[in-house]
Amino acid sequence: MNILAPSRIDLRRVSALVPLYNCAPFIEECLDSMLRQTHKDTEIVIYDDASTDDSVGRVKAVMEKNPGARIVLLEGKENKGPGYARNRCWEAATGGFVALQDADDVSSYARFECELAAIFKYGLPVVTCKRRPMAALGVKVTLMFRPKAIRVHRGRGSCGGMMCPRTPMVPFQETWGCEDASWKRDLGYLYFDKKIVRGVFYFSRDDPARETLRTERKRSQRYFAAFEEYRQRRKNPKARMDAIRPAAQPILQLLKTHSKPPE
Protein backbone atom coordinates (compact mmCIF):
# COMPACT_ATOMS: atom_id res chain seq x y z
CA MET A 1 0.00 0.00 0.00
CA ASN A 2 1.24 3.47 -0.88
CA ILE A 3 1.93 5.69 2.14
CA LEU A 4 1.49 9.36 1.24
CA ALA A 5 4.20 11.88 2.11
CA PRO A 6 3.58 13.61 5.47
CA SER A 7 3.26 17.00 3.70
CA ARG A 8 0.04 15.78 2.08
CA ILE A 9 -1.59 14.67 5.32
CA ASP A 10 -3.82 17.13 7.19
CA LEU A 11 -4.30 15.98 10.79
CA ARG A 12 -7.42 18.15 11.16
CA ARG A 13 -9.20 16.40 8.30
CA VAL A 14 -11.33 13.25 8.35
CA SER A 15 -11.41 11.29 5.09
CA ALA A 16 -14.54 9.20 4.56
CA LEU A 17 -13.70 6.10 2.49
CA VAL A 18 -16.63 4.94 0.37
CA PRO A 19 -16.28 1.81 -1.82
CA LEU A 20 -19.00 1.99 -4.46
CA TYR A 21 -20.57 -0.71 -6.61
CA ASN A 22 -24.10 -0.59 -8.03
CA CYS A 23 -25.56 1.56 -5.25
CA ALA A 24 -27.31 4.15 -7.42
CA PRO A 25 -30.54 4.13 -5.36
CA PHE A 26 -28.62 4.77 -2.12
CA ILE A 27 -25.43 6.74 -2.82
CA GLU A 28 -26.98 10.22 -2.76
CA GLU A 29 -28.43 9.71 0.71
CA CYS A 30 -25.09 8.31 1.87
CA LEU A 31 -23.16 11.32 0.53
CA ASP A 32 -25.67 13.74 2.00
CA SER A 33 -24.98 12.32 5.46
CA MET A 34 -21.24 12.85 4.84
CA LEU A 35 -21.66 16.42 3.59
CA ARG A 36 -23.71 17.38 6.65
CA GLN A 37 -21.13 16.27 9.21
CA THR A 38 -20.66 18.67 12.11
CA HIS A 39 -16.90 18.15 11.76
CA LYS A 40 -16.45 20.51 8.84
CA ASP A 41 -12.96 19.56 7.62
CA THR A 42 -14.20 16.43 5.90
CA GLU A 43 -13.08 14.75 2.68
CA ILE A 44 -15.09 12.09 0.84
CA VAL A 45 -13.04 9.59 -1.19
CA ILE A 46 -15.11 7.32 -3.44
CA TYR A 47 -13.81 4.42 -5.51
CA ASP A 48 -16.32 3.15 -8.06
CA ASP A 49 -15.61 -0.54 -8.63
CA ALA A 50 -16.83 -0.60 -12.25
CA SER A 51 -20.52 -0.14 -11.46
CA THR A 52 -22.97 -1.13 -14.20
CA ASP A 53 -25.77 1.16 -12.99
CA ASP A 54 -25.93 4.96 -12.66
CA SER A 55 -23.85 5.14 -9.48
CA VAL A 56 -21.11 7.29 -11.02
CA GLY A 57 -23.61 9.62 -12.65
CA ARG A 58 -25.32 10.24 -9.32
CA VAL A 59 -22.02 10.90 -7.58
CA LYS A 60 -21.08 13.43 -10.24
CA ALA A 61 -24.47 15.10 -9.84
CA VAL A 62 -23.79 15.51 -6.11
CA MET A 63 -20.36 16.94 -6.91
CA GLU A 64 -21.90 19.49 -9.28
CA LYS A 65 -24.42 20.57 -6.63
CA ASN A 66 -21.65 20.95 -4.03
CA PRO A 67 -18.70 22.57 -5.85
CA GLY A 68 -17.07 23.64 -2.59
CA ALA A 69 -17.08 20.16 -1.06
CA ARG A 70 -13.93 18.06 -1.00
CA ILE A 71 -15.10 14.99 -2.94
CA VAL A 72 -12.67 12.69 -4.77
CA LEU A 73 -14.11 10.19 -7.27
CA LEU A 74 -11.90 7.36 -8.51
CA GLU A 75 -13.26 5.17 -11.30
CA GLY A 76 -12.08 1.59 -11.69
CA LYS A 77 -12.21 -0.18 -15.04
CA GLU A 78 -12.68 -3.67 -13.63
CA ASN A 79 -14.76 -5.00 -10.74
CA LYS A 80 -12.25 -6.17 -8.12
CA GLY A 81 -14.25 -6.17 -4.90
CA PRO A 82 -14.69 -3.93 -1.83
CA GLY A 83 -11.30 -4.75 -0.32
CA TYR A 84 -9.52 -3.45 -3.41
CA ALA A 85 -11.79 -0.39 -3.49
CA ARG A 86 -11.12 0.47 0.17
CA ASN A 87 -7.37 0.18 -0.32
CA ARG A 88 -7.49 2.59 -3.28
CA CYS A 89 -9.56 5.03 -1.23
CA TRP A 90 -7.07 4.76 1.63
CA GLU A 91 -4.17 5.54 -0.69
CA ALA A 92 -5.89 8.66 -2.02
CA ALA A 93 -7.00 10.00 1.39
CA THR A 94 -5.33 13.18 2.62
CA GLY A 95 -6.93 13.35 6.07
CA GLY A 96 -5.11 12.46 9.26
CA PHE A 97 -8.00 10.13 10.10
CA VAL A 98 -10.15 7.84 8.00
CA ALA A 99 -13.80 6.95 8.55
CA LEU A 100 -15.13 3.80 6.90
CA GLN A 101 -18.52 4.21 5.23
CA ASP A 102 -20.48 1.80 3.04
CA ALA A 103 -22.18 3.34 0.00
CA ASP A 104 -25.66 2.09 0.90
CA ASP A 105 -25.54 3.18 4.56
CA VAL A 106 -25.84 6.57 6.26
CA SER A 107 -24.23 8.15 9.32
CA SER A 108 -25.47 10.55 11.94
CA TYR A 109 -24.31 14.09 11.23
CA ALA A 110 -22.30 14.14 14.50
CA ARG A 111 -20.53 10.82 13.93
CA PHE A 112 -17.11 12.13 12.80
CA GLU A 113 -16.93 14.81 15.48
CA CYS A 114 -17.73 12.40 18.30
CA GLU A 115 -15.49 9.58 17.08
CA LEU A 116 -12.55 11.95 16.63
CA ALA A 117 -13.07 13.37 20.11
CA ALA A 118 -13.10 9.84 21.56
CA ILE A 119 -9.80 8.97 19.85
CA PHE A 120 -8.04 11.89 21.51
CA LYS A 121 -9.86 11.86 24.85
CA TYR A 122 -9.17 8.19 25.53
CA GLY A 123 -5.97 7.77 23.48
CA LEU A 124 -7.55 5.15 21.25
CA PRO A 125 -6.12 3.77 17.99
CA VAL A 126 -9.49 2.56 16.66
CA VAL A 127 -13.08 3.50 17.53
CA THR A 128 -16.49 2.60 16.19
CA CYS A 129 -20.11 3.46 16.90
CA LYS A 130 -23.08 1.18 17.31
CA ARG A 131 -25.10 0.33 14.22
CA ARG A 132 -28.83 0.19 13.67
CA PRO A 133 -30.56 -1.49 10.69
CA MET A 134 -32.62 0.86 8.57
CA ALA A 135 -35.60 0.16 6.32
CA ALA A 136 -35.23 -0.78 2.66
CA LEU A 137 -35.21 1.64 -0.28
CA GLY A 138 -37.69 4.49 -0.04
CA VAL A 139 -37.62 5.06 3.72
CA LYS A 140 -35.35 7.81 5.00
CA VAL A 141 -33.76 7.89 8.44
CA THR A 142 -33.91 10.91 10.74
CA LEU A 143 -30.28 11.45 11.71
CA MET A 144 -30.66 12.86 15.20
CA PHE A 145 -27.68 13.58 17.42
CA ARG A 146 -27.27 10.96 20.13
CA PRO A 147 -24.34 11.73 22.47
CA LYS A 148 -23.65 8.21 23.82
CA ALA A 149 -22.22 6.23 20.95
CA ILE A 150 -18.50 5.51 21.04
CA ARG A 151 -16.66 2.34 21.95
CA VAL A 152 -13.21 0.87 21.45
CA HIS A 153 -13.35 -1.66 18.68
CA ARG A 154 -12.60 -5.34 18.24
CA GLY A 155 -15.48 -7.45 17.00
CA ARG A 156 -16.28 -9.16 13.70
CA GLY A 157 -18.32 -8.39 10.61
CA SER A 158 -18.81 -5.12 8.73
CA CYS A 159 -16.36 -2.28 9.37
CA GLY A 160 -18.80 0.52 8.50
CA GLY A 161 -18.84 3.10 11.29
CA MET A 162 -15.16 2.74 12.24
CA MET A 163 -12.58 5.53 12.48
CA CYS A 164 -8.81 5.32 12.92
CA PRO A 165 -5.65 7.29 12.02
CA ARG A 166 -4.93 7.28 8.31
CA THR A 167 -1.46 5.76 8.74
CA PRO A 168 -1.90 2.25 7.25
CA MET A 169 -1.93 -0.57 9.77
CA VAL A 170 -3.18 -3.60 7.89
CA PRO A 171 -4.39 -3.41 4.25
CA PHE A 172 -7.74 -4.89 3.36
CA GLN A 173 -7.52 -8.26 1.67
CA GLU A 174 -8.20 -7.84 -2.03
CA THR A 175 -9.97 -11.18 -2.35
CA TRP A 176 -13.72 -11.56 -2.72
CA GLY A 177 -15.77 -11.72 0.44
CA CYS A 178 -15.21 -11.18 4.17
CA GLU A 179 -12.51 -8.58 3.59
CA ASP A 180 -13.91 -6.37 6.36
CA ALA A 181 -14.20 -9.21 8.88
CA SER A 182 -10.65 -10.30 8.03
CA TRP A 183 -9.34 -6.75 8.48
CA LYS A 184 -11.06 -6.40 11.84
CA ARG A 185 -9.83 -9.84 12.85
CA ASP A 186 -6.25 -8.72 12.14
CA LEU A 187 -6.79 -5.67 14.34
CA GLY A 188 -8.05 -8.01 17.04
CA TYR A 189 -4.48 -9.21 17.53
CA LEU A 190 -3.59 -5.66 18.61
CA TYR A 191 -6.62 -4.16 20.31
CA PHE A 192 -9.13 -5.37 22.87
CA ASP A 193 -12.79 -4.57 23.28
CA LYS A 194 -13.76 -1.99 25.90
CA LYS A 195 -17.11 -0.24 25.94
CA ILE A 196 -17.00 3.48 26.66
CA VAL A 197 -20.55 4.66 26.01
CA ARG A 198 -23.60 3.37 24.18
CA GLY A 199 -25.82 4.68 21.40
CA VAL A 200 -26.24 4.74 17.62
CA PHE A 201 -24.43 6.83 15.00
CA TYR A 202 -24.48 4.47 11.99
CA PHE A 203 -27.47 3.14 10.08
CA SER A 204 -27.00 0.08 7.85
CA ARG A 205 -29.34 -0.85 5.03
CA ASP A 206 -30.83 -4.32 4.79
CA ASP A 207 -32.67 -4.47 1.47
CA PRO A 208 -34.25 -7.89 0.78
CA ALA A 209 -34.53 -7.01 -2.90
CA ARG A 210 -30.74 -7.21 -3.19
CA GLU A 211 -30.57 -10.74 -1.82
CA THR A 212 -31.00 -13.84 -3.96
CA LEU A 213 -30.39 -17.52 -3.42
CA ARG A 214 -27.29 -17.23 -5.57
CA THR A 215 -25.80 -14.41 -3.49
CA GLU A 216 -26.60 -16.27 -0.28
CA ARG A 217 -24.81 -19.35 -1.59
CA LYS A 218 -21.76 -17.30 -2.57
CA ARG A 219 -21.76 -15.58 0.81
CA SER A 220 -21.83 -18.93 2.62
CA GLN A 221 -18.92 -20.17 0.55
CA ARG A 222 -16.91 -17.04 1.36
CA TYR A 223 -17.58 -17.35 5.09
CA PHE A 224 -16.48 -20.97 5.11
CA ALA A 225 -13.30 -19.99 3.24
CA ALA A 226 -12.64 -17.11 5.65
CA PHE A 227 -13.15 -19.37 8.66
CA GLU A 228 -10.66 -21.89 7.29
CA GLU A 229 -8.15 -19.09 6.71
CA TYR A 230 -8.66 -17.85 10.27
CA ARG A 231 -8.20 -21.38 11.62
CA GLN A 232 -4.90 -21.70 9.77
CA ARG A 233 -3.68 -18.32 11.04
CA ARG A 234 -4.40 -19.23 14.66
CA LYS A 235 -1.93 -22.09 14.37
CA ASN A 236 0.86 -19.50 14.30
CA PRO A 237 -0.36 -16.26 15.95
CA LYS A 238 3.18 -15.09 16.77
CA ALA A 239 4.08 -14.88 13.09
CA ARG A 240 0.99 -12.78 12.44
CA MET A 241 1.80 -10.45 15.34
CA ASP A 242 5.36 -10.01 14.08
CA ALA A 243 3.97 -8.97 10.70
CA ILE A 244 1.44 -6.50 12.11
CA ARG A 245 3.47 -4.85 14.90
CA PRO A 246 5.78 -2.72 12.67
CA ALA A 247 2.80 -1.33 10.77
CA ALA A 248 1.10 -0.30 14.02
CA GLN A 249 4.01 1.78 15.33
CA PRO A 250 3.24 4.92 13.23
CA ILE A 251 -0.25 5.03 14.75
CA LEU A 252 1.00 4.73 18.31
CA GLN A 253 3.55 7.47 17.61
CA LEU A 254 0.85 9.69 16.10
CA LEU A 255 -1.32 9.37 19.20
CA LYS A 256 1.68 10.05 21.44
CA THR A 257 2.73 13.16 19.49
CA HIS A 258 -0.75 14.64 19.15
CA SER A 259 -2.26 14.17 22.58
CA LYS A 260 -5.14 16.57 21.94
CA PRO A 261 -7.38 17.27 18.94
CA PRO A 262 -5.97 19.75 16.41
CA GLU A 263 -7.40 23.25 16.60
Image (cartoon, rainbow, N blue to C red):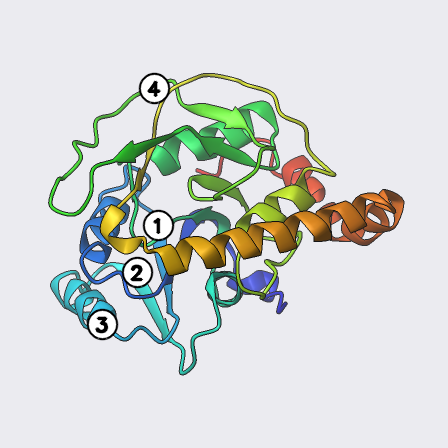
Q: CA distance from mark 3 to mark 4?
A: 37 Å
Location of mark 3 (residue): 53
Identified by mark 3, the residue type is Asp
> Please, is residue 107 above or below residue 102 in the view?
above
Location of mark 2 (residue): 70
Location of mark 4 (residue): 147
Q: What kind of element bears circle 1?
A: strand
Q: CA distance from mark 4 to mark 2?
A: 26 Å
Which disc is residue 60 wearing?
A: none
Position of 67 with respect to 199 (left or right) is left
In depth, the one of 210 and 64 nearer the eye is 210
Give the residue at x 62% y 69%.
Answer: 2
Whichever of callouts 4 and 2 sits on the residue coming sooner in the sequence is: 2
Crowding around mark 4 (Cα neighbors within 10 Å: few <14, some 14 to 19, many 20+) is some
Q: Position of residue 12 (x, y in %)?
A: 45, 46
Whichever of callouts 2 and 1 sits on the residue coming sooner in the sequence is: 1
Label 4 or label 1, whichever lies nearer to me, is 4
Whichever of callouts 3 and 4 sits on the residue coming sooner in the sequence is: 3
Location of mark 1 (residue): 42
Q: What kind of element bears circle 4?
A: loop
Q: What kind of element bears circle 2?
A: strand
Give the residue at x 52% y 64%.
Answer: 8
